[in-house]
Amino acid sequence: MMSQNLPAAASPVVTVNGLTKRFPGIVANDHIDLTLWAGEVHVLLGENGAGKSTLVAMLAGLQRPDEGEIAVNGRGEVLYSPRRALALGIGTVFQHAMMVPGLSVVDNIALGDPWWRRPARRFYAERVGQIARDIGVRVNPFALAGSLSLGEQQQAEIVRSLLRGSRVLILDEATAMLTPNNADELGQLMRRLVAQGMAVVFITHKLNEALAWGDRISVLRRGRKVGEINPQRLKTLTTEQATREVMQLMFNLSADDGDTTPVGSPTSTGNGAILDGSSANEMPTAASRLAAIGNDDTAYDARAGKNADTKDTFDVHVAAGPVLAVQALAVNDALVPLRDINLEVSAGEIVGIAGIDGNGQKQLAEALAGQRPLAGGRILLAGEAIEQLSIGQRRKLGLRYVTDDRLGEGTVGGFPVSINLLLKQIGEAPFWRRGIEQPEDIARHARERIAEYDIRTPEVDTPIGKLSGGNIQKALLARELGGPARMVIFAKPTHGLDVRNMTAVRERIRRSARAGMAVILISTDMDELLGLADRIGVMSGGRIVGMVAKGPRARSQIGELMSGITL
């Protein structure tokens, strides 16, 4: 499976024992054990919310654990700051460049030096050149950080980390913003670093990168480490076998779910196989009963800690003809271009979109909402072409988008709740008349929405950025589901929420469908998709590679499509 020769792992550099971190309403890391060995690329896999970022933050000295111990070279240590982590030889390169754009590489390196001393630019320039040559990269020490490409910035940050004496290098989603060529260069650089005796921790969503460059793979799910594939075992597995084993860990598949026996047959060739997730001759195993929660709303809500109505209360009449029809949609994007997307969603239907993060889900949502121009194809809303319409025009026709970026994109943190609830209607009557704000009407509207959606806020004028994530999400729902909505796109709507708010948001999604809206649900939570969606499309590499119907084997079929296995 892997062509590289694995270096001998001499000794553990960092040992994590029982590491636990809690935030209000959620356990981000739950008694995680992890060992980082010299001479290994240790890959951390897991969907959003699995706990990877929190674990990295504790190793980098940005967060303090509530329980557990981090030992460096066999000695228990308290990583109370990033400076302390660096002093102990743990360097971190984050997804987004952390250098000051207006400073040169050497001046960025000198930022950690004592303030009273002149920056040792010549010394740093020599060291940068030496380290860059040793690890096989080129870094201009006097170039402005902002003038470098993303790949060059990451190489400069790696050199900076090595200059500080790091023996452990953590690369947090380091390829997420890179082109394929730059990502491959980074992979080759990781192999050179471990060949020199370093320990590299590589966090990624991309399974192909994990299998190409990793020596050891650990999988996190819902804050826990659920499994590890060690180098000895990884060398014995084919790519397909390793893929299947990782997918079983990531998505809680059993051996039964991993069965490769073909089930059903394709009924459409639009974007890939449309799979029938059921079989009349299949006996219901424990695994298939778990997967069948997609057919049982009561079971799903019970797992979420809520007594639900029976399934009959969720039945809706699906009108003839799709509310949304996407035909051969294409979007040019430097990271994940979309090609040949075909999709239909009917009234009262919830169509899920699954896939490992970074396969075009965000680009698809933004293209449908009007935030990205199309390179080709058509988007029809109730039969009317909307691909040339603005965001506001699509909204007026009933297309709504609940973004996954609640604070960065969905709201303005410093604005009051009342204004955020009208953020997409600024200047419109009856809340503005002849350009003049109507405070009483705005406040009344806010109080109605706050009561209807149970938004916990001290006042209607409280800045929305001061609310919890769950209450910000409820405010987004209140804004987007109000008025004459026909079609709603939910992007990871429960990510980062506690169980109570998660349950409330999922119920809102159900209600939207029961009210006759067409719904697209983009999620990285397999249980959420199986519990809510009528059909689930799987995205990989900017395409919808298959559409899976509800059924006992839906979970395994989705996992196989996500991993690139042809069914």
Image: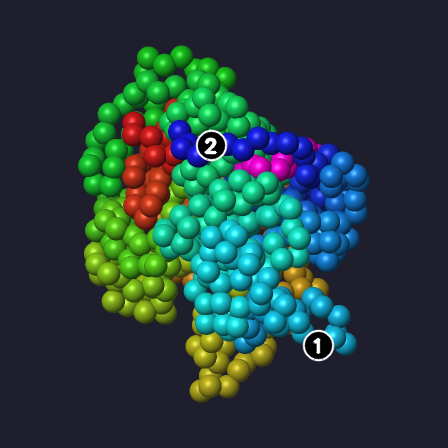
Percent position of residue 291, x then y: 46, 26
Q: Mainly helix, strand or loop, the magenta region? A: strand
Q: Which residue is tagged 2?
A: 5
Above or below, 242 against 517 in this view is: above
Residue 212 position within the rendered picture, expressed as x and y whole percent measured from the top left: 42, 37
Kindly identify the amino acid type of the residue bearing the numbered disc 1: Arg
What is the magenta range? Answer: 31-44
In the image, is residue 321 above or below residue 479? above
Name which residue lies at 71% across and 44% down: 21
Q: Is residue 170 visible?
A: yes
Please determine whether, in this image, residue 439 is positioned above or below residue 232.
below
Label 2 amino acid?
Asn
Membership of 42 in magenta stretch: yes
Circle 2: element type: loop
Q: Which of these two is toward me, 305 or 369?
A: 369
Residue at horizontal 52 percent and vertical 57 percent from the top: 132
Which residue is disc 1 drawn over?
A: 118
- The part of the image, by quadrant, that contains residue 77 is top right
Residue 376: image quadrant is: bottom left
In this view, the residue in front, 511 or 551, is 551
Asked whether residue 486 appears in the rendered view, the answer is no
- Give how far across and how far down residue 538 sits, in percent: 35, 40
Q: How many marks do you count on the picture?
A: 2
